[in-house]
Image (cartoon, rainbow, N blue to C red):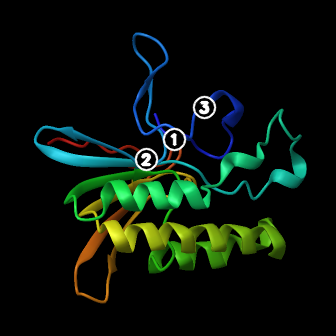
Amino acid sequence: FLDGNHDNHELLSHDSTEMVQLSEAVTYLPRGHVWEWGGKKLMALGGAVSVDKNRRTTFISWWPSETISHADTERAISNGEGEDIYIMFTHDAPAGVSVLEEYLKETAYMYGAKLEGESAAHRRTMREVVERVQPRFLFHGHYHHRYEDTLTFKNRNFTRVIGLGRDGQAHSWFVVSL
């Protein structure tokens, strides 16, 4: 798994780039971790802004280190740039994904301008990483909204972005076969 915004980040090592075996069946993929599977290179980059953190308790149900740091960003770019990353697994989405941006405009009333501003800034940081790494596919959760869209870059390369839905939502799951 990779970390999201509601995980206890005090228990996770964001400084490591190596997988962390937590039990026989559970492995944590730290921010910026790159690995090979089925002959393809994959990357993990967890983290996101809790737009409901004003209703949560610090170090109980909300952790300040939930967002990717400058060091996380640099590590992800350093590990992924020029590496032909096939799939990037993230918790948050990059900025500029038009289907998601439209959905967020429709649901912005639920959160408030300050928290949506923090969330938009985090998506811009994610965009910076994705532009530099340019994976072919990016799968993310966080918004609990199922969609597919394409993010095109200045050099005409593109990344297919797939947002995963929530439990009970039609097509909320996805299977990746390499």
Horizontally, residue 66 falls left or right of residue 81, namely: right
Q: Nearer the viewer, mark 2 or mark 1?
A: 2
Give coordinates of residue 2: x percent, y percent.
48, 39
**Residue labelled with disc 1:** 168
Q: Nearer the viewer, mark 3 or mark 2?
A: 3
Residue 35 location, quadrant: top left
Residue sitting farthest toward the top: 24
Numbered tag placed on residue 96 in the rendering: none
Residues at discs 2 and 1 in contact (Cβ within 8 Å)? yes
Residue at figure coordinates x 45%, y 54% from the top left: 75
The amino acid beneath tag 3 is Leu
In what quadrant of the picture does the C terminus appear?
top left
**Residue labelled with disc 2:** 172
**Residue labelled with disc 3:** 12
Gap in Å between the C-alphas at discs 3 and 2? Answer: 27 Å
- Looking at the image, is 113 positioned above or below residue 129? below
- Label 3, residues with CA under 10 Å away: few <14, some 14-19, many ≥20: some
Q: Nearer the viewer, mark 3 or mark 1?
A: 3
The amino acid beneath tag 1 is Gly
Give coordinates of residue 147: x percent, y percent.
41, 63
- Label 1, residues with CA under 10 Å away: few <14, some 14-19, many ≥20: few
> Which badge, 3 or 1, comes first in the chain's sequence?
3
Give coordinates of residue 105: x percent, y percent.
65, 79
Q: Is residue 163 visible?
A: no
Name the element at disc 2. loop
> Which badge, 3 or 2, comes first in the chain's sequence?
3
